[in-house]
Amino acid sequence: MTLQGKVRAAFKAAFGAPPAFIVRAPGRVNLIGEHTDYNDGFVFPMAIDRAAWIALRPRNDKRVLALSLDMDDRREYKLDDLRRPRQNQWIDYLIGVAWALQERGYTLRGWEGVVAGDVPIGSGLSSSAALELAAARAFHAVSGFQWDAAAIALACQAAENNWLGVNCGIMDQMISAAGVKERALLIDCRSLETDSAPLPPGTAVVILDTDTRRGLVDSAYNERRAQCEAAARHFGVSALRDIDLPTFERRASELDSLTRSRARHVITENARTLRARDAMDAGDADSLGQLMIESHISLRDDFAVSSPALDAIVDCANADGACYGARMTGAGFGGCAVALVDAAEAAGFVERVTACYTAATGIQPALYITRASAGAEMVHP
Ligand code: ADP
Ligand code: MG
Protein backbone atom coordinates (compact mmCIF):
# COMPACT_ATOMS: atom_id res chain seq x y z
CA MET A 1 0.00 0.00 0.00
CA THR A 2 1.18 3.55 -0.69
CA LEU A 3 1.83 5.80 2.27
CA GLN A 4 -1.12 7.89 1.17
CA GLY A 5 -3.32 4.80 1.35
CA LYS A 6 -1.79 3.88 4.70
CA VAL A 7 -2.51 7.20 6.41
CA ARG A 8 -6.01 7.26 4.89
CA ALA A 9 -6.81 3.76 6.20
CA ALA A 10 -5.28 4.47 9.61
CA PHE A 11 -7.28 7.70 9.85
CA LYS A 12 -10.50 5.87 9.11
CA ALA A 13 -9.68 3.19 11.67
CA ALA A 14 -8.87 5.79 14.33
CA PHE A 15 -11.58 8.39 13.69
CA GLY A 16 -14.37 6.38 12.06
CA ALA A 17 -14.62 8.43 8.85
CA PRO A 18 -12.41 9.25 5.86
CA PRO A 19 -10.01 12.21 6.31
CA ALA A 20 -11.02 15.66 5.08
CA PHE A 21 -7.49 16.34 3.83
CA ILE A 22 -4.27 14.53 3.05
CA VAL A 23 -1.05 16.53 2.88
CA ARG A 24 2.53 15.55 2.10
CA ALA A 25 5.93 17.25 2.28
CA PRO A 26 9.15 15.76 0.88
CA GLY A 27 12.69 15.19 2.12
CA ARG A 28 15.51 16.46 -0.03
CA VAL A 29 18.94 15.86 -1.47
CA ASN A 30 21.36 18.64 -2.38
CA LEU A 31 22.82 18.18 -5.88
CA ILE A 32 25.44 20.91 -5.56
CA GLY A 33 26.16 24.00 -3.45
CA GLU A 34 27.50 22.61 -0.16
CA HIS A 35 28.45 24.76 2.84
CA THR A 36 27.40 27.79 0.80
CA ASP A 37 24.08 28.46 2.57
CA TYR A 38 25.53 30.20 5.63
CA ASN A 39 27.76 32.24 3.31
CA ASP A 40 24.64 33.79 1.77
CA GLY A 41 25.34 31.74 -1.36
CA PHE A 42 23.55 29.36 -3.70
CA VAL A 43 22.33 25.81 -3.13
CA PHE A 44 20.77 23.47 -5.68
CA PRO A 45 18.70 20.74 -4.00
CA MET A 46 15.77 18.71 -5.27
CA ALA A 47 12.79 17.42 -3.32
CA ILE A 48 12.83 13.61 -3.32
CA ASP A 49 10.04 11.10 -3.74
CA ARG A 50 10.04 10.28 -0.01
CA ALA A 51 7.86 12.37 2.23
CA ALA A 52 6.00 12.89 5.48
CA TRP A 53 2.22 12.44 5.11
CA ILE A 54 -0.66 13.56 7.31
CA ALA A 55 -4.32 12.57 6.89
CA LEU A 56 -6.50 14.89 8.94
CA ARG A 57 -9.76 16.68 9.62
CA PRO A 58 -10.37 20.00 11.36
CA ARG A 59 -11.54 20.29 14.96
CA ASN A 60 -13.75 23.00 16.34
CA ASP A 61 -11.41 23.73 19.22
CA LYS A 62 -7.76 24.60 19.78
CA ARG A 63 -6.57 21.01 20.17
CA VAL A 64 -4.23 19.07 17.93
CA LEU A 65 -4.48 15.32 18.29
CA ALA A 66 -1.95 13.32 16.28
CA LEU A 67 -1.13 9.64 15.86
CA SER A 68 2.31 8.65 14.60
CA LEU A 69 2.30 5.34 12.75
CA ASP A 70 6.10 5.24 12.71
CA MET A 71 6.48 5.94 16.43
CA ASP A 72 3.35 4.01 17.39
CA ASP A 73 2.34 6.91 19.59
CA ARG A 74 -0.69 9.15 20.14
CA ARG A 75 -0.23 12.69 21.48
CA GLU A 76 -2.21 15.88 21.84
CA TYR A 77 -1.62 19.52 22.66
CA LYS A 78 -3.50 22.81 22.88
CA LEU A 79 -2.67 25.65 20.49
CA ASP A 80 -3.22 28.19 23.28
CA ASP A 81 -0.97 26.34 25.72
CA LEU A 82 2.23 25.26 23.96
CA ARG A 83 4.84 23.59 26.20
CA ARG A 84 8.54 23.83 25.39
CA PRO A 85 10.19 20.43 24.81
CA ARG A 86 12.50 18.91 27.42
CA GLN A 87 13.92 16.47 24.92
CA ASN A 88 12.85 16.54 21.30
CA GLN A 89 10.18 13.99 20.44
CA TRP A 90 8.25 13.71 17.20
CA ILE A 91 5.28 15.70 18.54
CA ASP A 92 7.58 18.63 19.37
CA TYR A 93 8.07 19.23 15.63
CA LEU A 94 4.30 19.66 15.31
CA ILE A 95 4.21 21.91 18.38
CA GLY A 96 7.20 23.95 17.18
CA VAL A 97 5.60 24.64 13.81
CA ALA A 98 2.40 25.81 15.55
CA TRP A 99 4.49 28.04 17.84
CA ALA A 100 6.41 29.60 14.94
CA LEU A 101 3.29 30.19 12.85
CA GLN A 102 1.40 31.74 15.76
CA GLU A 103 4.44 33.91 16.61
CA ARG A 104 4.18 35.27 13.08
CA GLY A 105 0.52 36.12 13.47
CA TYR A 106 -1.13 33.19 11.71
CA THR A 107 -4.43 32.16 13.30
CA LEU A 108 -4.51 28.39 13.64
CA ARG A 109 -7.35 25.97 14.02
CA GLY A 110 -7.06 22.57 15.71
CA TRP A 111 -7.06 19.25 13.86
CA GLU A 112 -6.81 15.52 14.42
CA GLY A 113 -4.91 13.21 12.17
CA VAL A 114 -2.44 10.44 11.37
CA VAL A 115 1.24 11.02 10.56
CA ALA A 116 3.59 8.67 8.67
CA GLY A 117 6.69 9.05 6.53
CA ASP A 118 9.28 7.25 4.44
CA VAL A 119 12.15 9.73 4.61
CA PRO A 120 14.78 7.72 6.51
CA ILE A 121 15.26 9.39 9.90
CA GLY A 122 18.66 10.84 10.70
CA SER A 123 20.42 9.91 7.49
CA GLY A 124 20.71 13.45 6.15
CA LEU A 125 17.67 13.55 3.86
CA SER A 126 15.88 15.92 6.24
CA SER A 127 13.00 13.93 7.62
CA SER A 128 12.66 16.76 10.15
CA ALA A 129 11.98 19.43 7.52
CA ALA A 130 9.54 17.05 5.80
CA LEU A 131 7.64 16.64 9.07
CA GLU A 132 7.66 20.39 9.73
CA LEU A 133 6.36 21.29 6.28
CA ALA A 134 3.72 18.56 6.43
CA ALA A 135 2.58 20.03 9.75
CA ALA A 136 2.49 23.52 8.22
CA ARG A 137 0.43 22.16 5.29
CA ALA A 138 -1.93 20.50 7.77
CA PHE A 139 -2.46 23.80 9.60
CA HIS A 140 -2.91 25.52 6.25
CA ALA A 141 -5.55 23.00 5.18
CA VAL A 142 -7.73 23.59 8.24
CA SER A 143 -6.94 27.27 8.93
CA GLY A 144 -6.98 28.65 5.40
CA PHE A 145 -4.20 31.26 5.69
CA GLN A 146 -2.19 32.31 2.67
CA TRP A 147 0.57 29.87 1.62
CA ASP A 148 3.73 31.72 0.77
CA ALA A 149 6.47 29.09 0.41
CA ALA A 150 9.35 31.29 1.59
CA ALA A 151 7.44 32.69 4.58
CA ILE A 152 6.32 29.22 5.65
CA ALA A 153 9.84 27.82 5.17
CA LEU A 154 11.24 30.58 7.40
CA ALA A 155 8.65 29.80 10.07
CA CYS A 156 9.56 26.09 9.96
CA GLN A 157 13.27 26.92 10.13
CA ALA A 158 12.52 29.08 13.19
CA ALA A 159 10.69 26.11 14.72
CA GLU A 160 13.74 23.91 14.19
CA ASN A 161 16.24 26.55 15.39
CA ASN A 162 14.34 28.12 18.27
CA TRP A 163 11.84 25.48 19.44
CA LEU A 164 13.75 22.26 18.80
CA GLY A 165 17.12 23.98 19.34
CA VAL A 166 18.64 22.45 16.20
CA ASN A 167 20.96 24.62 14.12
CA CYS A 168 20.15 24.49 10.38
CA GLY A 169 20.14 26.81 7.39
CA ILE A 170 17.11 27.59 5.25
CA MET A 171 17.74 25.05 2.48
CA ASP A 172 15.88 22.04 3.93
CA GLN A 173 12.65 23.88 4.68
CA MET A 174 12.78 25.91 1.48
CA ILE A 175 13.12 22.90 -0.83
CA SER A 176 10.49 20.92 1.07
CA ALA A 177 8.16 23.92 0.71
CA ALA A 178 8.91 24.84 -2.89
CA GLY A 179 10.22 21.74 -4.69
CA VAL A 180 9.17 21.17 -8.30
CA LYS A 181 8.44 17.81 -9.94
CA GLU A 182 11.21 16.58 -12.28
CA ARG A 183 13.27 19.70 -11.51
CA ALA A 184 15.94 20.87 -9.11
CA LEU A 185 15.62 24.20 -7.33
CA LEU A 186 18.35 26.82 -7.34
CA ILE A 187 17.95 28.79 -4.11
CA ASP A 188 19.61 32.11 -3.42
CA CYS A 189 20.10 31.83 0.34
CA ARG A 190 20.38 35.60 0.69
CA SER A 191 17.15 36.66 -1.04
CA LEU A 192 15.34 33.30 -0.92
CA GLU A 193 14.60 33.72 -4.61
CA THR A 194 14.27 30.40 -6.37
CA ASP A 195 14.62 29.24 -9.94
CA SER A 196 13.96 25.69 -11.03
CA ALA A 197 15.83 23.78 -13.72
CA PRO A 198 15.12 20.38 -15.28
CA LEU A 199 17.27 17.36 -14.55
CA PRO A 200 19.08 16.34 -17.76
CA PRO A 201 16.93 14.00 -19.87
CA GLY A 202 17.65 10.30 -19.41
CA THR A 203 19.34 10.75 -16.03
CA ALA A 204 18.45 9.52 -12.57
CA VAL A 205 19.61 10.75 -9.20
CA VAL A 206 20.88 8.11 -6.79
CA ILE A 207 21.34 8.73 -3.06
CA LEU A 208 24.18 6.71 -1.54
CA ASP A 209 23.98 6.38 2.25
CA THR A 210 27.36 5.31 3.64
CA ASP A 211 25.69 4.17 6.87
CA THR A 212 28.30 6.12 8.82
CA ARG A 213 27.58 9.05 11.15
CA ARG A 214 30.04 11.12 13.11
CA GLY A 215 29.46 12.75 16.45
CA LEU A 216 31.73 15.78 16.13
CA VAL A 217 29.86 17.32 13.21
CA ASP A 218 28.61 20.28 15.26
CA SER A 219 31.98 21.53 16.44
CA ALA A 220 33.53 21.09 12.99
CA TYR A 221 30.55 22.89 11.45
CA ASN A 222 30.90 25.83 13.83
CA GLU A 223 34.64 25.98 13.15
CA ARG A 224 34.06 26.13 9.36
CA ARG A 225 31.48 28.85 9.82
CA ALA A 226 33.91 30.90 11.91
CA GLN A 227 36.65 30.47 9.29
CA CYS A 228 34.30 31.65 6.53
CA GLU A 229 33.26 34.65 8.61
CA ALA A 230 36.90 35.52 9.24
CA ALA A 231 37.64 35.42 5.52
CA ALA A 232 34.62 37.60 4.74
CA ARG A 233 35.71 40.10 7.41
CA HIS A 234 39.19 40.20 5.93
CA PHE A 235 37.75 41.10 2.53
CA GLY A 236 35.41 43.67 4.08
CA VAL A 237 32.17 42.00 2.96
CA SER A 238 29.25 40.65 4.96
CA ALA A 239 29.53 37.15 3.44
CA LEU A 240 31.81 35.23 1.07
CA ARG A 241 28.98 35.30 -1.46
CA ASP A 242 30.18 38.83 -2.30
CA ILE A 243 33.66 37.77 -3.40
CA ASP A 244 34.00 36.61 -7.00
CA LEU A 245 36.69 34.26 -8.23
CA PRO A 246 38.97 36.86 -9.92
CA THR A 247 38.92 39.04 -6.77
CA PHE A 248 39.69 36.03 -4.62
CA GLU A 249 42.57 34.93 -6.82
CA ARG A 250 44.06 38.39 -6.79
CA ARG A 251 43.94 38.64 -3.00
CA ALA A 252 44.16 35.02 -1.84
CA SER A 253 47.77 35.38 -0.66
CA GLU A 254 46.62 37.83 2.02
CA LEU A 255 44.97 34.97 3.91
CA ASP A 256 46.68 32.29 5.97
CA SER A 257 46.67 28.96 4.15
CA LEU A 258 43.86 27.33 6.15
CA THR A 259 41.46 30.29 5.83
CA ARG A 260 42.44 30.53 2.15
CA SER A 261 41.44 26.90 1.52
CA ARG A 262 38.12 27.28 3.32
CA ALA A 263 37.29 30.47 1.42
CA ARG A 264 38.37 28.94 -1.89
CA HIS A 265 35.88 26.12 -1.42
CA VAL A 266 32.96 28.47 -0.78
CA ILE A 267 33.82 30.84 -3.62
CA THR A 268 34.43 28.12 -6.21
CA GLU A 269 31.38 26.16 -5.01
CA ASN A 270 29.12 29.17 -5.54
CA ALA A 271 30.49 29.51 -9.07
CA ARG A 272 29.99 25.78 -9.73
CA THR A 273 26.43 25.96 -8.47
CA LEU A 274 25.55 28.72 -10.90
CA ARG A 275 27.25 26.82 -13.73
CA ALA A 276 25.18 23.77 -12.76
CA ARG A 277 22.05 25.71 -13.65
CA ASP A 278 23.44 26.42 -17.13
CA ALA A 279 24.31 22.73 -17.52
CA MET A 280 20.76 21.72 -16.54
CA ASP A 281 19.16 24.28 -18.82
CA ALA A 282 21.28 22.88 -21.64
CA GLY A 283 20.38 19.27 -20.69
CA ASP A 284 24.11 18.64 -20.37
CA ALA A 285 24.57 15.67 -18.01
CA ASP A 286 28.33 15.46 -18.65
CA SER A 287 28.96 19.04 -17.51
CA LEU A 288 26.66 18.71 -14.50
CA GLY A 289 28.42 15.49 -13.50
CA GLN A 290 31.83 17.12 -13.88
CA LEU A 291 30.77 19.98 -11.60
CA MET A 292 29.65 17.44 -8.99
CA ILE A 293 33.02 15.67 -9.19
CA GLU A 294 34.84 19.00 -8.72
CA SER A 295 32.54 19.87 -5.81
CA HIS A 296 33.55 16.69 -3.99
CA ILE A 297 37.26 17.34 -4.51
CA SER A 298 36.83 20.87 -3.16
CA LEU A 299 34.87 19.65 -0.11
CA ARG A 300 37.47 16.94 0.51
CA ASP A 301 40.67 18.93 0.00
CA ASP A 302 39.84 22.59 0.64
CA PHE A 303 36.96 22.39 3.10
CA ALA A 304 38.03 19.10 4.74
CA VAL A 305 34.53 17.84 5.54
CA SER A 306 34.57 14.49 3.74
CA SER A 307 35.41 11.17 5.41
CA PRO A 308 37.02 7.88 4.34
CA ALA A 309 33.56 6.31 3.90
CA LEU A 310 32.27 9.21 1.80
CA ASP A 311 35.44 9.19 -0.32
CA ALA A 312 35.11 5.43 -0.79
CA ILE A 313 31.51 5.53 -1.97
CA VAL A 314 32.14 8.54 -4.21
CA ASP A 315 35.17 6.81 -5.75
CA CYS A 316 33.11 3.66 -6.39
CA ALA A 317 30.38 5.75 -8.02
CA ASN A 318 32.69 7.86 -10.16
CA ALA A 319 34.52 4.75 -11.40
CA ASP A 320 31.25 3.29 -12.69
CA GLY A 321 30.47 3.66 -16.40
CA ALA A 322 26.86 4.68 -15.71
CA CYS A 323 27.85 7.66 -13.54
CA TYR A 324 28.15 11.24 -14.79
CA GLY A 325 29.39 12.46 -11.42
CA ALA A 326 29.08 11.89 -7.68
CA ARG A 327 29.85 13.87 -4.56
CA MET A 328 29.24 13.92 -0.82
CA THR A 329 26.06 15.79 0.10
CA GLY A 330 25.02 17.45 3.34
CA ALA A 331 27.27 18.70 6.12
CA GLY A 332 29.77 15.85 5.68
CA PHE A 333 31.92 13.60 7.89
CA GLY A 334 29.49 10.76 7.11
CA GLY A 335 25.96 10.39 5.86
CA CYS A 336 25.10 10.45 2.18
CA ALA A 337 26.59 11.04 -1.24
CA VAL A 338 24.61 11.80 -4.38
CA ALA A 339 25.22 10.63 -7.95
CA LEU A 340 23.87 11.61 -11.36
CA VAL A 341 23.58 8.45 -13.45
CA ASP A 342 22.23 7.15 -16.73
CA ALA A 343 18.59 6.30 -15.91
CA ALA A 344 18.60 3.13 -18.00
CA GLU A 345 21.63 1.87 -16.04
CA ALA A 346 20.51 2.99 -12.57
CA ALA A 347 19.62 -0.46 -11.20
CA GLY A 348 22.96 -1.93 -12.32
CA PHE A 349 24.77 1.09 -10.86
CA VAL A 350 23.14 0.48 -7.48
CA GLU A 351 24.22 -3.16 -7.49
CA ARG A 352 27.80 -2.47 -8.58
CA VAL A 353 28.40 0.46 -6.22
CA THR A 354 26.92 -1.48 -3.29
CA ALA A 355 29.37 -4.32 -3.97
CA CYS A 356 32.31 -1.94 -4.52
CA TYR A 357 31.69 0.02 -1.28
CA THR A 358 31.13 -3.12 0.79
CA ALA A 359 34.36 -4.61 -0.55
CA ALA A 360 36.26 -1.40 0.31
CA THR A 361 34.83 -0.76 3.78
CA GLY A 362 32.98 -3.85 5.03
CA ILE A 363 29.88 -1.68 5.45
CA GLN A 364 26.51 -2.31 3.81
CA PRO A 365 25.32 0.98 2.25
CA ALA A 366 21.73 1.96 1.40
CA LEU A 367 21.24 3.26 -2.15
CA TYR A 368 18.03 4.91 -3.35
CA ILE A 369 17.13 5.75 -6.91
CA THR A 370 15.07 8.89 -6.53
CA ARG A 371 12.97 11.29 -8.59
CA ALA A 372 12.48 15.01 -8.13
CA SER A 373 9.07 15.53 -6.56
CA ALA A 374 6.81 18.49 -5.84
CA GLY A 375 7.12 20.41 -2.59
CA ALA A 376 4.61 20.46 0.28
CA GLU A 377 1.10 20.03 -1.09
CA MET A 378 -2.42 18.93 -0.39
CA VAL A 379 -3.47 15.87 -2.36
CA HIS A 380 -6.98 14.55 -3.00
CA PRO A 381 -7.98 12.61 0.10
P1 ADP B 1 17.00 14.19 9.69
O1 ADP B 1 18.41 14.27 9.21
O2 ADP B 1 16.32 13.00 9.09
O3 ADP B 1 16.26 15.47 9.48
P2 ADP B 1 16.70 14.89 12.46
O4 ADP B 1 17.37 14.37 13.66
O5 ADP B 1 16.89 16.32 12.10
O6 ADP B 1 17.07 13.92 11.26
O7 ADP B 1 15.11 14.70 12.64
C1 ADP B 1 14.60 13.43 12.93
C2 ADP B 1 13.44 13.55 13.91
O8 ADP B 1 12.28 14.07 13.23
C3 ADP B 1 12.99 12.21 14.45
O9 ADP B 1 13.74 11.85 15.59
C4 ADP B 1 11.53 12.46 14.79
O10 ADP B 1 11.40 13.13 16.02
C5 ADP B 1 11.11 13.41 13.68
N1 ADP B 1 10.53 12.67 12.54
C6 ADP B 1 11.01 12.62 11.28
N2 ADP B 1 10.22 11.84 10.49
C7 ADP B 1 9.23 11.38 11.28
C8 ADP B 1 8.10 10.52 11.08
N3 ADP B 1 7.86 9.95 9.88
N4 ADP B 1 7.28 10.28 12.11
C9 ADP B 1 7.51 10.84 13.32
N5 ADP B 1 8.56 11.64 13.58
C10 ADP B 1 9.42 11.91 12.60
MG1 MG C 1 16.91 17.31 10.27
Image (tube, helix red, strand yellow):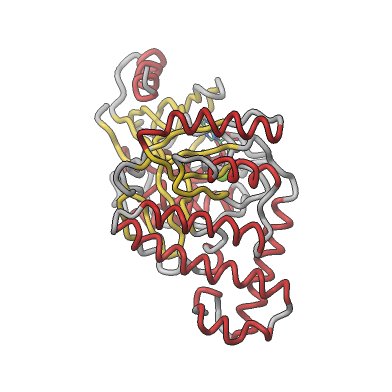
Tag count in the figure?
0
| Residue 206 horizontal/vertical position (percent) | 46, 39
Image location of residue 347, percent across then percent down: 43, 29
Residue 45 higher or lower than 121, as above or below? below
User: On the image, which quarter does residue 59 sit in?
Assistant: top left
**Could you say which is closer to the camera, residue 55 or residue 26?**
26
Asked if residue 139 shows in the view, the reply is no
Residue that sits furthest to the left in the current view:
380
> In which of the image's four quarters is ligand 1 placed?
top right
Q: In which quarter of the image is the N terminus?
A: top left
Quadrant of the image for the C terminus? top left
Can residue 214 be seen from the camera position used here?
Answer: yes
Residue shown at 65% from the left, 30% from the top:
358
- Vertical side of 261 occupied by 37: above or below: above
The residue that appears at 49% across and 37% down in the rendered structure is 78
Q: Position of residue 280 (x, y in %)?
A: 33, 56
Q: Residue at x 35, y 48 (%)?
A: 179
313 or 86: which is nearer to us? Answer: 313
Residue at image coords 36%, 42%: 203
Give whichever of 34, 284 is nearer the camera. Answer: 284
**Residue 75 appears left or right of 372:** right
Q: Position of residue 114 (x, y in %)?
A: 43, 25
9 lies above or below 59? above
- Say above or below: 302 vs 72: below
